[in-house]
Each structure stands twice: as C-alpha cells, then as structure tokens.
Image (spheres, rainbow, N blue to C red):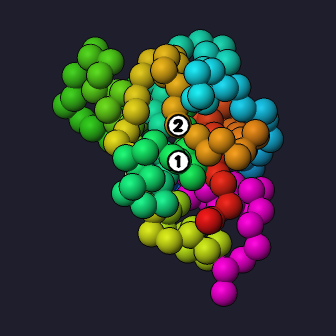
Amino acid sequence: MAEKFDAQVIAAKLMGSVQDLMEKTCKSKLSEKPVMETKEIIEYGSRMRVLGLSKFDGPCYVAAVNLYLNQKKSEDKDACGVIVSYWEQETAEGFVRALQKGLDLEDPDVILDSCGEFCNSIAGQFKNELAAFGYPELNLSTIIKARNEIDEGVDFPFSEGEYCELSFKVKNKKVVVVSLVMAPPA
C-alpha cells in the first residue's frame, strides 16, 4: 500500500540516499545532520531557475536530473520531479581527485561529468524508493550540468510552488546542496 504523499517525507528519503552515496562513494562522513529547508521556486520562462552561486560563497558545479511518469511525459517535458545537486568547487575537485586517480583535474569538464554522474546516481537510487509512495517506474532525463548555474533552468512540475533544499556538511563546511521538487503521483 502506498504511503500518503508528503513532500517533507519524500525529501527525507532523498536525504538518506544522498548521505548513503556520500559515505559509500565519496568516503565522506557528514559532520552534522543535514539541514532541510522549504523554499519558493523561482520560475523564469516556464522553467525553474537553478542558481548555484546562491548556495555557496564561491563557484560550484551544478547537475540536474528530471523525473517523468512515462516516456510520453518525458517527450512532452512534463516533469513530475527534479533533483538538482550543487557541489562547492573545492569539494568537488577533492572528491574527484580521491575517486578518479589519473584524471585531468585541470579540465573542469572532467569534474562536471563526475558531479553529473553523482546526481544521476542519487536520482537512480531515489526513484527506486518512490514506489512506496505510489509512483510507477519513473523515467530519468539525461543529466543537465553546468558551472555555477543552469542558464536555461530545468523542467519542474508546474503544480508545485516550493522545493526542499537539503544541505550537507563535511568537516563543518557546507559542501553539497541537493534540491528536490516532487509532485504527487498521478
């Protein structure tokens, strides 16, 4: 039986997925419990604005993955959700350096690709957990990635006016932020 839809509960599931992946993949232990905040979506041109510079005191890497109920909805750009991950630049470089020995870290695209793959891993693990909330097997978009912000924004469910923002700290420094917009299952 599907659980009642509650965006905060769903965001808490996502929080667990991110924390698990950070500990297993990045070998990073959080220094404190992640912080969850609800924020208003900034819409521009029928898309959600994605502004990474507002998350940290400096440059960052941004990656996003949309979730769709089916292939038709994907083709129509009718998202039922979106996950956006923001990586503080120095942290992203350190994680990639630790995980991908031998890569050219002078090439920002290498780091951007790794941050995109991490976001895709988060989305893949998270979509498997959504069945408990009545969601069918969801389709994931290709990874959208950029430095500092995604200029064109991302698709989001228009029925939603808010998103949950999750902040993760390592060594008492905010290093990763993940935003989630999720509409109830149809």
Q: Could you say which is closer to the camera, residue 13 or residue 6? A: 6
**Which residue is pictured at 47% across the width and 37% down the height?**
64
User: Residues in magenta?
Assistant: 1-19
Residue 156 - label: none
Query: Could you say where residue 152 lies in the image, as x and y percent from the top left?
Result: 48, 20
**Which residue is pictured at 65% across the width and 72% down the height?**
133
Q: Could you say which is closer to the camera, residue 147 or residue 75? A: 75
Splitting the image into 4 quarters, where does residue 42 fall? top right
Query: Could you say where residue 8 lies in the image, as x and y percent from the top left?
Result: 77, 56
Quadrant where the image shows the N terminus:
bottom right
Q: Secondary structure at mark 1?
A: loop
Q: Secondary structure at mark 2?
A: loop
Sequence-wise, the earlier of marks 2 and 1 is: 1
Q: Which residue ends up furthest to the left in the rendered image?
A: 102
Q: What residue is shown with label 1?
A: 79
C-beta proximity under 8 Å, tags 2 and 1: yes
Spatial CA span between label 2 and label 1 = 6 Å
Q: Could you say which is closer to the camera, residue 25 or residue 151? A: 151
Query: Could you say where residue 6 lies in the image, as x and y percent from the top left?
Result: 77, 62
Quadrant where the image shows the C terminus:
bottom right
- In the picture, measured across the screen, residue 126 lies left or right of residue 177, that is left
Q: Is residue 42 above or below residue 7?
A: above
**Which residue is pictured at 74% across the width and 56% down the height?**
7
| Amino acid type for the residue under numbered disc 1 | Ala
**Which residue is pictured at 78% across the width and 35% down the height?**
39
Q: What residue is shown with label 2?
A: 155
Is residue 57 on the magenta stretch? no
Q: Main secondary structure of the magenta part?
A: helix
Q: Is residue 33 above or below residue 98?
A: below
Query: Could you say where residue 135 lies in the image, as x and y percent from the top left?
Result: 56, 69
| Amino acid type for the residue under numbered disc 2 | Asp
Is residue 4 on the magenta stretch? yes
